[in-house]
Image (cartoon, rainbow, N blue to C red):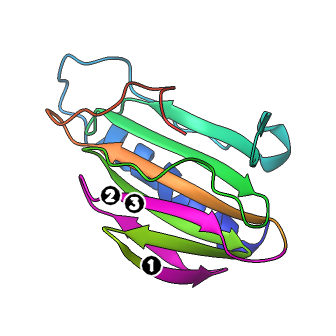
Amino acid sequence: MTRRDLAFLSLGLAAGIVATVCAQGAAAPKPLASGVFAWDQLPVEKTASGERRAVFDGATATVDRLETHVTTVNPGSASHAAHRHPDEELVYVREGVIEATIDGRTQRAPAGSVIFFASNDLHGMRNAGDVPASYFVLRWTSPGHEGPKPGGSK
């Protein structure tokens, strides 16, 4: 992993740590624990379009759900069809070129790019290059706005 990859993963970890530190003792599910999630220890799930590595998925003291995974998509493929959901999503392109479509508008996102999908925007992504492309996804839902349950997203 590069420093850039570690910086993005650290963003997700920092969000979890800050959420835990800011807890006011609200009665909620046990928060996601602080930790280090080593790349070589992440389970690899083969998919029809490439592979997926789940990093973490759970509640924190300040968000209903904080989820991070890494998807690798084969050239010309998409990990899934365009969709929308109430939670927001931040995507960091690790390698390759991703073509992101947001509400019908398409833009290219080369390695190092960051993509933000706002709540309920119709969005999709595909690998627009000729080599595998991978990206980190960070999704969260605020209290009272919970979207899909942990383990239910791709």
Image side of residue 132 versus residue 6, left or right: right
Gap between marks 1 and 3 measured at Cα: 10 Å
The disc at residue 106 is 1
Residue 124 lies within the magenta run: yes
Callout 2–callout 3 Cβ contact below 8 Å:
yes
When the figure is inspected, residue 143 is found, relative to residue 128, above or below; the finding is: above
Question: Which class describes the residues within 10 Å of circle 1: few (<14), some (14-19), or many (20+)?
Answer: few
Q: Is residue 7 visible?
A: no
Residue at image mark 3: 123
As drawn, is 99 to the left or to the right of 90? Answer: right
Question: Where's residue 18, x and y in %?
Answer: 36, 49
Mark 1 and mark 2 lie on one chain; the one further toward the N terminus is 1
Name the residue: 19% across, 16% down.
27
Q: Residue 93 or 2: which is nearer the viewer?
A: 93
> Splitting the image into 4 quarters, where does residue 30 fall?
top left
Bounds of the magenta span? 106-130
Numbered circle sitting on residue 122: 2
Name the residue type under label 3.
His
Instruction: Decide: few, some or many residues near mark 3? Use Cα within 10 Å; few <14, some 14-19, many ≥20.
Output: many
Q: Position of residue 29 (x, y in %)?
A: 32, 17
Residue located at (72% from left, 74% from top): 3
Three-letter amino acid code of the residue under disc 2: Leu
Magenta stretch containing residue 60, yes or no?
no
